[in-house]
Image (cartoon, rainbow, N blue to C red):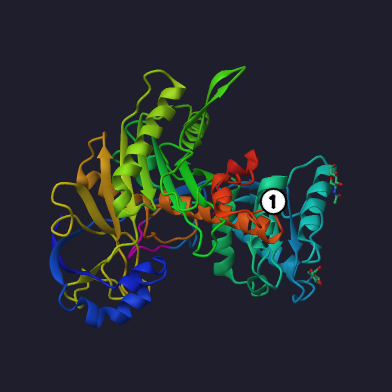
Amino acid sequence: MAVLKIFCAFICNCAMARTNAYNEDTLVNKEFGIQVADGLTSVDARILPAPMLKYHETGREASVNPGFGQWNMINKKMFNGGRVEVWTCVNFSTRLNRDVPFQFCQGLVDMCNSKGMVFNPRPVIPISSSNPNQIEKALVDVHNRTAQQGKQLQMLIIILPDVSGSYGRIKRVCETELGIVSQCCQPRQASRLNMQYFENVALKINVKVGGRNTVLVDAVQKRIPLVTDRPTIIFGADVTHPQPGEDSSPSIAAVVASMDWPEVTKYRGLVSAQAHHEEIIQDLYKSTQDPQRGLVHGGMIRELLIAFRRSTNFKPHRIIFYRDGVSEGQFSQVLLHEMNAIRQACASLEEGYAPPVTFVVVQKRHHTRLFPADHNRRDLTDRSGNILPGTVVDTHICHPTEFDFYLNSHAGIQGTSRPTHYHVLYDENRFTADGLQVLTNNLCYTYARCTRSVSIVPPAYYAHLAAFRARYYIEDETSAGGSTGGSRSTAERSLAIRPLPVIKDNVKDVMFYC
Ligand SMILES: *[C@@H]1O[C@H](CO)[C@@H](O)[C@H](O)[C@H]1NC(C)=O
Ligand SMILES: *[C@@H]1O[C@H](CO)[C@@H](O)[C@H](O)[C@H]1NC(C)=O
């Protein structure tokens, strides 16, 4: 593969470092002139080819070759369209014209069907409207009326209230009380009947009912390096901390794991509350002594390994663990504790069961930016003038003895693309650098919610979404006057971490967090 020259800059601005890492690109651009001047280094880079993606065309398989990190589904159908037999819609928006909810649902159902799903055009109970001040009652009512027909909703489409702030309640009630998988839509979008919007929503609905939008061609041909040769489970994990000021709020850990092999597109997501600002994931493995049953094993890794076995009929022979949300100073503690938990979880399933593990830290928050050495080189830049998706740097600015790399896997939109730093802390699978880089880059094309490659490896992205979803649950409990904190002292609050509301099993079986 050709080696290209690009520039690298270490951006140093402490104020900026503290701002939210997912939104600061424009800031970087503004500060470019001053900040970068004396920090620009020329580095060697390679550009990894985009993978081919598999879809269906009428009656046959078809593959797509993404260009510049993007592709489209014109005349293409989902690789595995899901089936929706039992659904309905509830409207909470007071501003829409009378026919809008019906037209909206019809447009959405038509789009789902045209993209390869099998979506019943008739709702199980009529599309209804409900008072936005009585959300809980409306959801229970829809649930009950479906149950009266001896059925269970597979999908509830919800047109959100005009005033924001109800999303958390809707998701908490649906996912933790009623066992309903839902798709929420903004009233503004519902009235526009926009085809691109319908397509994006259809992609989300499909994975929420267990379908697959696309898979890597090489997965079908059983040729993804590091994955297809033996049953492999890929984990993503993240911890999100509460905003400053929310001292009584716990940190939330989320772990997702792939449930299909060799395709690696469906991820089951679990969440767990832990002490405020605790960076190490506490609930990866747990054991308790039960007076009747003796030693009882638990924890998120164990649950996910069991689910993998159930859905693929294989036990994983290899584990790849992408861990987001670790600060540099915590690398060794996190590695030590979490590797140990992974080991214990494996051993708890079967004596001597110890599949090789590769532990990779994923960092979006760093100060390195990559720029094309020559902005006019079409083979180095995309239309936004950014470095190309697939650009990888693993020399010079990386650690001399450790295994790490910067990968810019996504297309630039505005500002300077932020590459993601992957740092392999532990590698029992003995991957080559190229092997892990290609695998990571390929996975970035399998993110379910869009027809673009994304900037962080999807399992890490999904873990972030799942943790974010759980944050909504507790915000709703708090705003509903739940018993968080109140007059209790800080010490008392940190002792008792209130567990998250439990997500229903049927919801956990699909990518509800998408
Ligand atoms: C949607 O629901 C709201 C709240 O119940 C109601 O005021 C409004 O008329 C409904 N809109 C439509 C188009 O049915
Ligand atoms: C829904 O059904 C449950 C159990 O059958 C019942 O307890 C509850 O009152 C019903 N709620 C509504 C709003 O119909």
| Magenta part, dominant SS | loop
Q: In which quarter of the image is residue 294?
A: top right
Q: What residue type is labelled 1?
A: Cys
The region drawn magenta spans 65-71
Point out residue 22 in the picture as x, y percentages from the top left corner.
41, 65
Left or right of 203 on screen, residue 504 = right
Residue sitting at x 68%, y 74%: 191
- Does dot 1 land on a helix, a strand or a loop? helix
For mark 1, does the 10 Å Cα neighbourhood hold few (<14), some (14 to 19), or many (20 or more) residues? many
Residue 491 horizontal/vertical position (percent): 54, 50
Q: Mark 1 points at which residue?
A: 174
Q: In this view, does 157 lie to the left or right of 397?
A: right
**The N terminus: image quadrant:** bottom left
| Residue drawn at 48 percent across, 56 percent down | 241
Q: Of 393 and 366, which appears nearest the observer?
A: 366
Query: Which of 226 and 19 lies nearest the eye of the viewer?
Result: 19
Residues 25 and 293: in front is: 293
